[in-house]
Amino acid sequence: MVRWLFSHLNIGLPEDLHDRIKKHPEIRWAAVAREFLIQYLDELEKVKESQPTLALKINNNDKFICK
């Protein structure tokens, strides 16, 4: 059984992306973001398990890079 502890995460979006999202009110964007975060963290944790000394940092394009 999954226990839900609700917390909020605020993210900044470029205006054009926000405008595109607003065109689709039928989509539960929080659910989309939640699923993406779960998948991303699952992949990240697999990489960290296989390379425990791996260091991650964010580059200028807000992308994670491995060092």
Image (cartoon, rainbow, N blue to C red):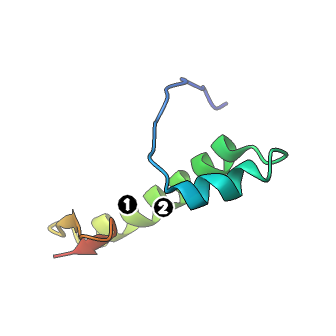
The 10 Å Cα crowd at callout 2, few under 14, some 14 to 19, many 20 or more, is few
First along the sequence among labels 1 and 2: 2
Give the camera-side residue of 50 and 41.
41
Q: Which residue is mark 1?
A: 45
Residue 6 vertical placement versus 24 (above, below): above
Q: Position of residue 5 (x, y in %)?
A: 54, 23
Q: Position of residue 51 (x, y in %)?
A: 23, 72
Residue 4 vertical placement versus 58 (above, below): above
Q: Is residue 29 toward the left or the right of residue 53 in the image?
A: right
Give the camera-side residue of 53 and 59.
59
Residue 49 vertical placement versus 22 (above, below): below
Residue 30 vertical placement versus 60 (above, below): above
Q: Residue at x 24, y 70 (%)?
A: 60
Q: Position of residue 17 (x, y in %)?
A: 59, 59
Q: Is residue 46 toward the left or the right of residue 67 in the image?
A: right
The disc at residue 19 is: none
Q: Residue at x 85, y 46 (%)?
A: 26
The 10 Å Cα crowd at callout 1, few under 14, some 14 to 19, many 20 or more, is few
Q: Which residue is mark 2?
A: 40
Q: Secondary structure at mark 1?
A: helix
Which quadrant: the C terminus?
bottom left
Q: Residue at x 49, y 26 (%)?
A: 7
